[in-house]
Image (spheres, rainbow, N blue to C red):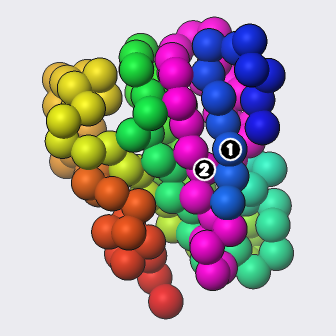
Amino acid sequence: MSDPDSLMMISTATVGSAVVVTVAGELDLHTARELMTSVDDTFALPDLGGVVIDLTGVSFLGSSGLGTLAELATRAPACRPGAAPVAVRLVSPPENLAVIRPWETMNLQQILPLYPDVTAALADLPR
């Protein structure tokens, strides 16, 4: 868990063979590296079936945060040589405009769709 005085909080939970990384607060230049480190640590887990990054609690998504999310999702399948690819799914409900607006502005939904909730994202992970 992150420092309570920080601009962003991260927590992780295991659900079956997947890990849900929950992010709350501001995801920007000052906090993006913390998310990258947390997800990289998750990628190292044995028998990992997928990672769901839940952005429901994100109140600001800056360009550095967008870049970090896109990088995590696109490099994840190749992050563990010799092991099965790791699928990454992102969650943000449609009413979270702090995430939806920049996501749509950068046209990222074409390469990396957002799921409306964690249940839908988990259901879409490879079995």
- In the figure, 115 relative to 39: above or below? below
- Asked if residue 119 lies left or right of residue 50, the reply is left
- Magenta span contains residue 33: yes
Percent position (x, y) of residue 67?
46, 27
**Label located before the other in sequence (2 or 1):** 1
- In the figure, 21 relative to 68: above or below? below
Percent position (x, y) of residue 30?
63, 10
Kind of residue at disc 1: Ser
| Figure quadrant of the N terminus | top right
- Within the image, what quadrant is residue 98 found in? top left
Residue at image position (32%, 44%) is 92
Q: Which region shows up in magenta?
A: 14-39
Kind of residue at disc 2: Val
Q: How many marks?
A: 2
Residue at image position (51%, 58%) is 52
- Whether residue 83 is visible, yes or no, is yes
- In the figure, 117 relative to 100: above or below? below
Describe the element under mark 2 as helix, strand or loop. strand
The residue lying toward the viewer, choosing from 42 and 73, is 42
- Whether residue 111 is visible, yes or no, is no
Residue 21 bears which disc, if any? 2
The residue lying toward the viewer, choosing from 24 and 19, is 24
Question: Which residue is labeled 1 in the image?
Answer: 11
Describe the element under mark 1 as helix, strand or loop. strand
- Within the image, what quadrant is residue 3 found in? top right
- Asked if residue 73 lies left or right of residue 121, the reply is right
Percent position (x, y) of residue 11?
68, 44
Residue at image position (69%, 74%) is 48
Could you give the CA–CA distance between mark 2 and mark 1, rounded to whole angstroms? Answer: 6 Å
